[in-house]
Amino acid sequence: MIMKITKRVAVSVETYYQPAYSKPIDSEYVFAYRITIENFSESTVKLLRRHWFIFDSNGVVREVEGEGVVGEQPTILPMQNHTYVSGCHLKTELGKMSGSYLMERVEDGKKFHVQIPEFTLVAEFKLN
C-alpha cells in the first residue's frame, strides 16, 4: 500500500491485477485499485472532482477528469474515511497512475487539491 497526505487528508492506494478480465494475447490488461481517503483535519470535507493521469509502459498517457468518484461525491467527517474500488485497463502489462482530488471544506466552502500518490500497475506474471 502507498499513501500520501495533503492538508491533513491521506490517500492510500492498493492495486490488484485482474487476470480473469485481462486478455494478454490482445494486449488488454485490467487492474483494480482500492482507495481509502482519511480525513485527519478538524473540518468536514467533500470530494468534488477527480483528475487522473494514466501511463502505459509504451508511452501512452491518458488524462481522465470528472465529477466525484464512482458516481459519488462523498462527504468525510473529521477522523473518518471513505473507501472505494475502481479500475482501469492498459494495453501493456506495466503502467502507473497519479492524480488529485478537488475537495471542499464544508464549513466555509474553501476548495483545495489533495494529491493521489503515484502508484504502479503490474501484471503479477511480470514479477516472476
Image: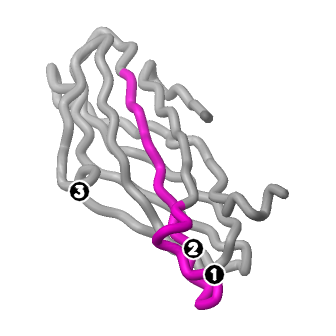
How far is the residue under mark 1 from the one under mark 2? 6 Å
Q: Are marks 2 and 3 in contact (CB under 8 Å)?
A: no
* Mark number displayed over residue 67: 3
3, 114: nearer the viewer:
3
> Marks 3 and 1: which is nearer the front?
1
Q: Nearer the viewer, residue 85 or 72?
A: 85
Q: Amino acid at mark 3?
A: Glu
Badge 2 or badge 3: first in the primary sequence: 2
The crowd level at tag 3 (other Cα within 10 Å; few <14, some 14-19, many 20+) is some
Location of residue 96 in the rendering, given as x and y in whole percent from the top left corner? 63, 59
The N terminus sits in image quarter: top right
Q: Which residue is mark 2?
A: 29
Element type at mark 3: strand
| Residue ranking furthest to the bottom | 26
| Residue bearing the label numbered 1 | 24
Specify start and end residues of the magenta stretch as a single range: 18-38
Q: Measure the alpha-carbon separation of dots 3 and 1.
A: 31 Å
Cβ atoms under marks 1 and 2 closer than 8 Å: yes
